[in-house]
Amino acid sequence: MSSEKDKKDSKISEAIQVGREFYRLTLFVLLITGGAVAIFASVQLLLGTVSYLRTRAVYDEANDRFVSIHSKHTRPDNGSVSEDGVPVSADTVSEDSTYEDIQVDLKALREINDEVIGWIYFEDGLISYPILYSGDNDKYLKRNYKEKYMASGSIFMDMRGNPDFTDHYTLLYGHNMRDLTMFGKLRYYRSDKNYYKEHEYFRIITEEGVYRYRVFAFKQIEADSDVFSVIQADETGLSEFAKKYLIAGSSIDTNTTIKDSDHVLALSTCVNDYTYRFIVCGVRESFEPAVSGNSAQGSASSGNAQ
């Protein structure tokens, strides 16, 4: 009887020992796996951080080197004079007029890469990048303006567009980066109700001069939307196209009517679900010819375009 009990106890002990060994092995595997996952995640985070820092460094350097911006605030009283020494009447200047002079040395940029066709600048400086055109929609997905590999890529024009911005409808693409570089800040148009009021205008600086655009619509669309059609400079139909594909369903109603003779520029970026895109659309409101052959420059008030 005792022998039977001993055998049973021995089997139970063996089972317990096997269970302990299995538990230790499982715990060891989990620790190794968890450690590997943690290491992989840490490496990815480090690489991502390095990539973000590299992007900022490259484009901060480009802004410092090629862009000159001067903010001016004018609130004239009786007897005020302009910078040229000419008397300024309080009746001819708004009560609180704020404008920026911006110069971009596109000639120097094109010596680095002749596929630079301009510069995009939002009037708060949050988006300020060179614009590239290569004749395809792949090259600058992962290359910066120096044609070097960079995950954030570049801001570039759709391959079907005219790089001189003469089309009535132009598409520009840029990545929606998590660190808010490139077109990452466009997300705020849909997440912050007050963002539009403070970010209504942007400019395109070319060798010919400075084009100023007013944002009139923005929305999320499917990646295969007809928004990604292109209306050429010699075609008509912009008014109907804008009404049907850009204004309809917009997250904001700006009470804007687009004419066939207008020039519209759509900024497109991806969202978290790659089956969708987010677009911000602007209509051209003014143009200032370039001052010199070496750079384009222009000024615009922070209120309504002149």
Image: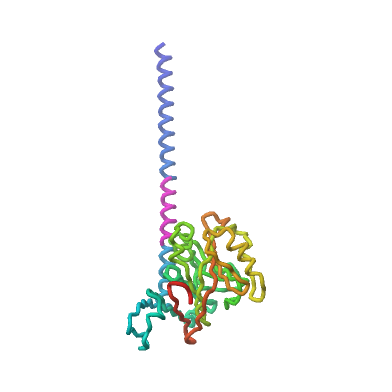
Q: Nearer the viewer, residue 103 or 71?
A: 71
Instruction: Give the quarter of the image for residue 21.
Output: top left
Boundaries of the magenta span: 34-49
- Position of 82 relative to 258 (above/below): below
View extreme (top): residue: 1
Report whether residue 31 is seen.
yes
On whether residue 44 falls in the magenta region, the answer is yes
Instruction: Give the quarter of the image for residue 267.
Output: bottom right
Image point (62%, 60%), residue name: 225
On whether residue 176 falls in the magenta region, the answer is no
Tell whether 252 sits left or right of 49.
Answer: right
Q: Nearer the viewer, residue 52 or 265?
A: 265
Q: Which quadrant is home to the N terminus?
A: top left
Expressed as whole percent of the image width and height from the top left, the position of residue 75 reads 35, 77
Expressed as whole percent of the image width and height from the top left, the position of residue 108 reads 47, 82
Image point (67%, 73%), residue name: 235
Image point (40%, 36%), residue name: 24
Expressed as whole percent of the image width and height from the top left, the position of residue 290 reads 49, 84
Image point (61%, 64%), residue name: 243
View extreme (bottom): residue: 85
Q: Nearer the viewer, residue 6 or 23?
A: 23
Q: How many discs appear?
A: 0
